[in-house]
Amino acid sequence: MTMELPQQVRALERLLLREDIEQFLYQEAALLDERRFHEWIDLIADDIHYHMPIRRNVKFGELDHENTDAESEMSWFDEGKRTLLGRVRQIMTGVHWCEEPFSRVRHIVSNVQVVGVRDDEVDVKSNFFVWQNRLQEEVNVFVGRREDILRRDEETGWKIRKRLILLDQNVLLAKVITTFF
Amino acid sequence: MPARQDSALRKLVDLDKGLVAREIYVNEDIFRQELEQVFARAWLFVGHESQIPNPGDFVVSRMGTEEVLLVRDRKGNIHVFLNSCRHRGMKVCRYDDGNTLVFTCPFHGWSYDTDGRLVGVPYFKAAYKDRLDKTQFGLLEVAQMTNYYGSIWATWDPKAPSFEAYLGPYADAVRRCFEATDGTDAGVELFQPVYKWRIPTNWKFPAVSFDGDRAHAAMTHRSINVAAIGPQGDRNGGSRHVIQAEWSQTNYEMSTPELGHGGHNSIFDQPGVPPYEDTWLTEPGVDEYYRATREKRRQKYQDTYILGGEKLLVWPNTNVQAGLLSRILIWHPHSVGVTESWRAYQVDRDAPKPVKDAQRHYMMRYGGPCGLTESDDMENWNYAHAASSGTIAQRIPYNFQMGLDSSFRDERAPGMTLNYDIAEENQRSRLKRWLDFMEADSWDDLYPYAEPDGKGAASKNRERGSRP
C-alpha cells in the first residue's frame, strides 16, 4: 500500500505526537515511582481538575449513572492543584504514617490513545496498573483507565489540565489511597 | 471458645483495672458471637430518607456482615429487608440503588413487591399446584425500624426497646445531629453515594475509640496541618480545627456506661448556642450562609441548656457528628480482621449549591480513604490489629487506664459519666456495654438499665427544658 506524500506526513505527525505523549506519561509515572513528588506536581496545570469518581453497580441501560458526578456527588478524589500540593507536602513530612516508611509503588501505563487534538491541547486515554507493596506483605492493586486533557507547555512539554480516573472497583478494597494516578 | 453466661469473657475485660485482653479483638470465635449477641440485637444505622425520596426507590445497605435493602414501597412506606431470596438465598438486588416495581431474583425468578410481599413464583400453578403459601415467603423484614428525624435505624430483635429509649440520655443529641444548621428538625440530606471501603482491622478498633480518643490526635495526625486542607486554608498554620467563638464552656468525654453511647461534648455555662465565628476563609459566601442559619438556631435554643458539640458513638458501631464535619460513620464488621467502613456525609437540605459544594469538597479531602486527615488512622488501626494477633502478643492486655477512677457525674448532664476531655472513659463505657451484650441472654438482661443515681435520665432532661 502506498500513501500520498501529504498522507504520509500526517501519519508521521500523528506517530510523533503519540510518541511524545507516551514519553511524557512514562516520565510522569517514573517521577511518582521514584518519589520525586515535587517534580511531579510541576507537571500539574494550575487549573487541573483531578477526579476519581466512585463506580456504582447499575442496571443495564443506566450506565450514565455508573460514575459519580463531580457536580453534586461524592467521589474518591475531586480536587484541584491546591489539595494535590497539600498531599505532596504531607507525604514529604516523614510523619505521614500511612506513607512512612514509603510504600513501593509502580505505575504501569499502557493502551495510550490520542483521541483529540486541538491547538494547544490533546485528549489522551490510557490504562493504568498500579502496584503498591507496603511494609512486609500489604499489597494493593489499582487498575483502571484515565482520560486526560494535556496542555502544551514550553518548560515541561505538557501539563495535565484534566484527569478523570476510572478505578475498576466499587467498594474500595484498599484501606487508603496515598498514591497519585 | 468462651461460652455465654460464664466468667470467661468477664476475665478478659477488667474495666476496674483498665486492662482488656487483646483476644476480644482478634479471636474468631468471639467475632462470630458478636454477630449474634451484638449485631443481631442492637439498633443499627441503615440509611437516610433522602436516599429514597420516591415510591419504588431503593438503596443497598448493610447490617452487621449482611446486606439489606432500604426501600420505599409504592405507598410511600419505608422498609428494611434482608437482601436474600426466600427460595435459595440469592441476592434479589445487585444494584447499588435505583427505582423498581419489583425485585426479581435472577436465579429462579421469584419476585417481590417493594413492600416485601412475594408476588411472583414461576411454575406456581404447574409445579407447586398452587400449594405454596406465598404469604409466608416474603422478603425477611427487620423486627423494628424507625425513622428518627430522617435517619433510618433498624434491629433484628423484636424485644429491643424503642430507638429513643435505646438512646436514653442521648436522644436529644442524636436528634440534633440530623437538624439543619438553622435548627430545623430533619433538615439534612446525605450526599450520594455513601463511601465504602475495607480496613484491615477489627471493627472495635474504630468503634471503641472514635469520639473517645482525643489522645491519638497529636501523634497520629502530626502531618496534617502542613497540608492546610481546612476551610481556613493556610491561615492558623493550616489547622484542621474549627475556629470557635468565645463562649463559656467546659469540654468533657461523656458517655453512658449503661447504654454504651457517648462522645466528646461540652457543657455550656449558659443556655443557648455559641455565636458563629467565620470558618470558611477560602470559600466566598459560605460563612454568610452559616452565620445566618446559626442566628436562627441561636434563637431556637436561646432559653435551653443543650450539650455542645454533637459528636458521639451510638452503640455499637455508628458515630453521628454534627457541625463542620456533619457525617455518619458506620463500622461494619466484615471478618475478625476486616472492617467495612461506610461514611455518609450530611448537608443542610435547603443550602444553596455553593455551600453544598464547599461542604462536599471539604469532606472529601478531610476524611475517608482518600482524605488527608484520616488516612493515618487507618494505618494505625491496621497494624495495631496485626501486631495484637500473635500468640505472645495475646498474653499481654491492652491498657485502658487513662482517666481511670477520675470519672464523675454532673447534674447538668443527667445519666452520663463525665471525665476530662482527654481520657479513655468512653472507651471503657463501650467495652462495658460490649460485655453486657456478649453475656446477656436477651434484651431482658439489657434493658431497662439501672441508673446509678436512681433517677430517670429522660425526666431530668425535661427539667432542663431541652425538649420541646
Image (cartoon, coloured by chain):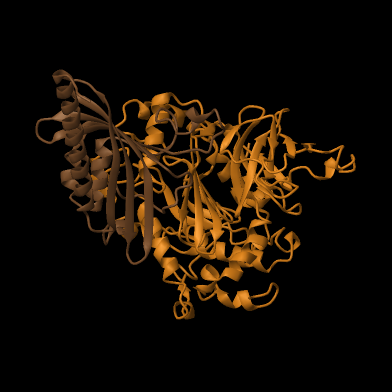
| Quadrant occupied by the C terminus of chain B | top right
Report which quarter residue B355 is drawn in. top left
Observer-nearest of B216 and A169:
A169
Give the residue at the far left of this rendering.
A155
| Quadrant occupied by the N terminus of chain B | bottom right
Q: Residue at x 84, y 41 (%)?
A: B135
Task: Where is residue B324? Give x, y as percent.
Answer: 41, 40
Q: How many marks?
A: 0
Task: Where is residue B334? Give x, y as percent.
Answer: 55, 57
Q: Residue at x 17, y 33 (%)?
A: A158
Give the residue at the far front of this rendering.
A1
Question: Vertical placement of B81 versus B443: above or below?
Answer: above
Question: Vertical placement of B410 versus A59: above or below?
Answer: below
Observer-nearest of A157 and B352:
A157
Report which quarter residue A67 is drawn in. top left
Observer-nearest of B196 and B119:
B119
In the figure, is residue B300 to the left or right of B72?
Answer: left
In the figure, is residue B133 to the left or right of A105?
Answer: right
Observer-nearest of A58 and B339:
A58
Task: Where is residue A31? Give x, y as percent.
Answer: 19, 48
Q: Please indicate, yes or no, whether residue B387 appears anywhere in the rendered image.
A: yes
Q: Please indicate, yes or no, whether residue B276 appears anywhere in the rendered image.
A: no
Q: Which chain is orange?
A: B
Give chain A's shade: brown
Task: Where is residue B62? Give x, y as percent.
Answer: 60, 48
Report which quarter residue B440 is drawn in. bottom right
Q: Residue at x 44, y 39 (%)?
A: A54
Q: Residue at x 67, y 62 (%)?
A: B37
